[in-house]
């Protein structure tokens, strides 16, 4: 039975996906609780640029702008990239995208994950408008979930009990809710690690994102506002370990060679870190179980080569927000199977296409086979010269699937 005091939605996890969803729904007038295991590390202007950065696509920026957090993020520290150059170590041909060609100011923005999460977290503490409410439960995790006909009940580890029409798991790749619901999370292990660092270069980055496909994995240089570049270099595990162990001069020499010295010689400005890509292709077999739904990395994890993970998660947010608003307008139960299935149908197909597409690119460009190298060289050359195809690829690069 539906009870007084029941919430509309419980969101588990306050990363970019969960934080944006909880904020959006509270602003749309829903009653929401957010359950987060640990308070996010605060972002401070005086700290150096954090090593975890993402390339945000224009539609992800639009969502953050709609939630009134983009202005704070942009004025704090965000770096637009206006061009993108992609080329291959083993074959000729090059792709170049330019925002100006498309009449846009930027293809995307390089932003620290920590800044996005911190800004959303602060906004979650401001009173909701439109009659919405937001209850923060932090630090807390979900100990148990049960359902009856009208609601899903969540028992938190601190003894709090919450009931709502819908529970959304946005707790990242290791989602405990997904495991409790026994939803499979299958995929492929890349046996790679992404080595990240911020570097200075002899030549200016020209607000361009540079990416070169190498046999072991792609290396990307993402332009930072202070003139440095943030590098993401996907490497086989042993190679990554070797790169981490090198001294700065030897590492920069390897990085310069890997980037064809397009930016000239490279100078280290930070320590290096590595993120395992063990889980870089994982797809939940379902996004919905009863009144529970998965989103963001809890539902799909993709290879970082095109920088799409967070962008896909924010597209999940936009979709579920629209689906729940429509359900409320029609007077439907927010957690009804037909409502949540609509979200699942829309998002699962797009996310699967993106994940499989990125996986295929990683396989083709990560191979050193001679016939494949010839084929991909021809593909880059054709795509580079054929303007409509280049526009399609620019859309893909900017996350518009
Ligand atoms: C090297 C690298 C580069 C990348 N580059 C890009 C890029 O350029 N562009 C892009 O779009 N994406 C990129 N990504 C992917 C992107 O970082 C992720 O897709 C995104 O951060 C996922 O956000 P999320 O909110 O779904 O999950 P998370 O960021 O993992 O957030 C999960 C939240 O849930 C909380 N939590 C965890 N467990 C529990 C629990 N049991 N109970 C309660 N709370 C819990 C966590 O504390 C956290 O706050 C990159 C990833 C890597 C590894």
Image (cartoon, rainbow, N blue to C red):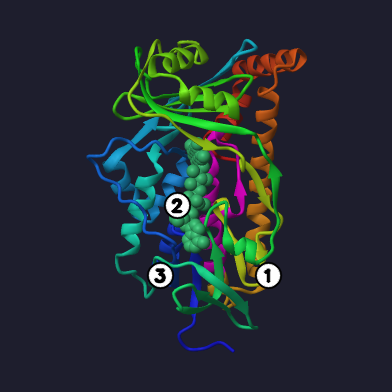
The reply to whether the residue tagged 2 has its Cβ within 8 angstroms of ligand 1 is: yes
Residue at x 66%, y 23% (from the top left corner)? 365
> Is 103 situated above or below 90?
below
Residue 183 coordinates in the image, percent (x, y): 69, 60
Q: Secondary structure at mark 2?
A: helix
In this figure, which residue is indicated by the disc labeled 1? Answer: 338
Going from the N terminus, do you reach mark 1 or mark 2 first? 2
Q: Residues within 10 Å of mark 2 (few under 14, many from 20)?
A: many
Q: Secondary structure at mark 3?
A: strand
The quadrant the C terminus occupies is: top right
The part of the image, by quadrant, that contains residue 1 is bottom right
Q: Is residue 245 magenta?
A: no
Going from the N terminus, do you reach mark 3 or mark 1 first? 3
Relative side of 150 to 67, left or right: right
The reply to whether the residue tagged 3 has its Cβ within 8 angstroms of ligand 1 is: no
Residue 312 coordinates in the image, percent (x, y): 55, 47
> Where residue 137 is drawn, which disc sits there?
3
């Amino acid at each position: 039975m539906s009870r007084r005091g029941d919430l509309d939605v419980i969101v588990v996890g306050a990363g970019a996906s969960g934080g944006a969803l909880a904020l959006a729904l509270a602003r749309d007038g829903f009653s929401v609780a957010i359950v987060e295991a640990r308070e996010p590390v605060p972002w401070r202007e005086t700290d150096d640029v954090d090593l975890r950065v993402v390339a945000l696509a224009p539609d992800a920026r639009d969502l953050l702008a709609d939630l009134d957090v983009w202005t704070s993020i942009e004025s704090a520290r965000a770096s637009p990239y206006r061009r993108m150059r992609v080329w291959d170590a083993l074959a000729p041909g090059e792709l170049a995208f330019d925002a100006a060609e498309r009449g846009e100011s930027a293809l995307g923005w390089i932003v620290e994950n920590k800044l996005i999460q911190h800004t959303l977290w602060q906004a979650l503490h401001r009173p909701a408008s439109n009659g919405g409410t937001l209850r923060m439960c932090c630090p807390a995790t979900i100990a148990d979930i049960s359902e009856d006909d009208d609601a899903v009940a969540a028992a938190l580890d601190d003894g709090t009990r919450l009931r709502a029409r819908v529970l959304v798991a946005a707790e990242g790749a290791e989602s405990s809710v997904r495991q409790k619901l026994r939803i499979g999370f299958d995929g492929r292990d890349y046996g790679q690690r992404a080595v990240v660092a911020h570097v200075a270069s002899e030549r200016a980055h020209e607000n361009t994102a540079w990416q070169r496909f190498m046999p072991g994995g792609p290396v990307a240089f993402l332009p930072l506002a202070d003139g440095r570049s943030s590098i993401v270099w996907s490497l086989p595990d042993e190679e990554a370990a070797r790169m981490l162990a090198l001294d700065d001069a030897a590492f920069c020499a390897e990085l310069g060679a890997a980037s064809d010295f397009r930016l000239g010689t490279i100078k280290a400005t930070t320590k290096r870190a590595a993120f395992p890509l063990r889980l870089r292709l994982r797809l939940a077999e379902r996004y919905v179980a009863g009144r529970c739904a998965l989103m963001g990395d809890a539902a799909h994890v993709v290879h970082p080569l095109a920088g799409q993970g967070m962008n896909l998660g924010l597209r999940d947010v936009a979709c579920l927000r629209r689906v729940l608003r429509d359900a409320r307008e029609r007077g439907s139960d927010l957690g009804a199977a037909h409502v949540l299935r609509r979200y699942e149908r829309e998002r699962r197909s797009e996310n699967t296409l993106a994940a499989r597409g990125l996986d295929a690119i990683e396989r083709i460009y990560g191979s050193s086979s001679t016939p494949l190298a010839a084929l991909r060289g021809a593909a880059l050359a054709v795509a580079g010269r054929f303007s409509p195809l280049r526009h399609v690829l620019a859309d893909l690069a900017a996350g518009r699937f």
